Image (cartoon, rainbow, N blue to C red):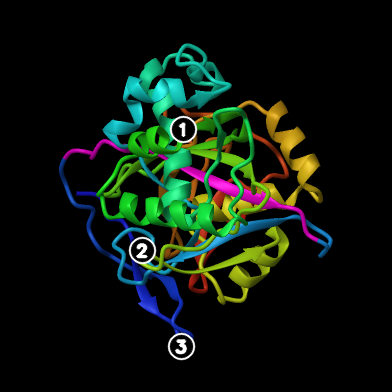
């Protein structure tokens, strides 16, 4: 049976969950769990601090998945997200075009559109931001106290499973504005993990008149950070970024303005990232598909010299390395 170093979580003095390595643990035998489809949204706003800002939320330490980590809003695809009854409430994207929009032409059409719905729904559930407009394309004015109160009640009912996204769309006669979403990346949890997700990442501008707020349940803290600031805080162990978030933040940090970020993202091809686990010199890490030693068939990408291709546990945190 192969031996593999397992990652365990402990609390630092500041209460932040950090990563340590248990040496010599054995890999659990058995079949690989299939990943569940999911979507996450990187909410962007302009800032006067020299670089645009990203909305980040900290997961509760007791969460079994990424407990204590700072994350973007998101979650798994629900069956209801693929309900054709939602289609009349979707603007600027048809079910037939959704796969091409995601750069996944072979994905089932209903699932492709459902993933976009899930991105908008989860952003509303977790952050209170709704990427939608009125039926005549008018802006949803959350600065209006009565409107804001109604949608806070909708969000609460949605999180308590007392209503559905379709019910809200019908009641408010709103349209979900898919043009606000820009596909950014596509990550699949490594095969050794018991809880796995097949996650599509999107960019989205923060709509005018809306203020994101964490749900205070699974997500217990939130803040706006520039990509550079987030990376520095992670390096100082003041926040925890897990590998997909850390690598995403590095890519975000390559752009100084939000306009540059969105333009560059729209130009880029998206390739699915299935990290390959490895251990070396007592350190646990993952190789990304463009690493020269990555070997998982179907996901391998050409080597990109000068770009970090490995994410490794080092001194209690995840760090990226070029190989």
Going by the image, does 180 lie left or right of 77?
Answer: right
Q: What residue is pinned by disc 3?
A: 13
Q: Nearer the viewer, residue 252 or 92?
A: 92
Which residues lie in the magenta part? Answer: 31-47
Q: Is residue 57 visible?
A: yes
Q: Earlier in the sequence, mark 2 or mark 3?
A: 3
Q: Residue at x 72, y 62 (%)?
A: 228
- Tell me the mark number nearer the camera, choosing from 2 and 3: 2
Residue 178, position as x, y percentages in the image: 56, 30
Q: Which residue is mark 2?
A: 218
Going 42% across and 42% down the picture, which residue do you hit?
A: 121
Crowd tier of the residue under label 1, counting other residues whose Cα lies within 10 Å: few below 14, some 14–19, many 20 or above: some
Q: Nearer the viewer, residue 260 or 303?
A: 260
Residue drawn at (28%, 49%) of the image: 195
Q: State yes or no: discs 3 and 1 in contact (Cβ < 8 Å).
A: no
The number of discs equals 3
């Amino acid at each position: 049976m192969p031996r593999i170093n397992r990652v365990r979580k402990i609390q630092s003095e500041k209460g932040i969950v950090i990563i340590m390595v248990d040496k010599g643990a054995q890999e659990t035998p058995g079949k690989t769990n299939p990943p569940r489809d999911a979507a996450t949204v990187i909410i962007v706003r302009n800032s006067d601090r020299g670089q645009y800002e990203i909305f980040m939320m900290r997961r509760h330490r007791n969460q079994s998945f990424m407990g204590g980590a700072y994350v973007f809003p998101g979650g798994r695809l629900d069956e209801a997200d693929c309900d054709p009854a939602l289609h009349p409430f979707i603007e600027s994207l048809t079910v037939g075009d959704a796969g091409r929009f995601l750069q996944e032409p072979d994905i089932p059409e209903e699932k492709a559109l459902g993933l976009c719905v899930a991105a908008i729904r989860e952003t509303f559930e977790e952050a209170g931001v709704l990427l939608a407009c009125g039926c005549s394309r008018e802006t949803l004015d959350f600065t209006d106290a009565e409107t804001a109160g109604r949608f806070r009640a909708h969000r609460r009912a949605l999180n308590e499973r007392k209503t559905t996204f379709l019910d809200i769309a019908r009641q408010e006669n709103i349209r979900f504005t898919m043009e606000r979403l820009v596909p950014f990346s596509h990550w699949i949890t490594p095969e050794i993990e018991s809880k796995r997700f097949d996650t599509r990442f999107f960019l989205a501008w923060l709509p005018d008149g809306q203020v994101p707020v964490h749900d205070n349940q699974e997500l217990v803290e939130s803040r706006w950070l520039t990509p550079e600031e987030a990376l520095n805080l992670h390096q100082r162990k003041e926040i925890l970024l897990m590998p997909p978030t850390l690598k995403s933040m590095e890519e975000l940090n390559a752009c100084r303005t939000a306009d540059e970020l969105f333009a560059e993202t729209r130009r880029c091809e998206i390739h699915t990232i299935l990290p390959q686990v490895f251990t070396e010199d007592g350190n646990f890490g993952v190789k990304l598909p463009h690493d020269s030693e990555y070997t998982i068939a179907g996901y391998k990408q050409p080597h990109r010299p000068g770009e970090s291709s490995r994410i490794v546990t080092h001194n209690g945190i995840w760090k990226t390395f070029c190989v």
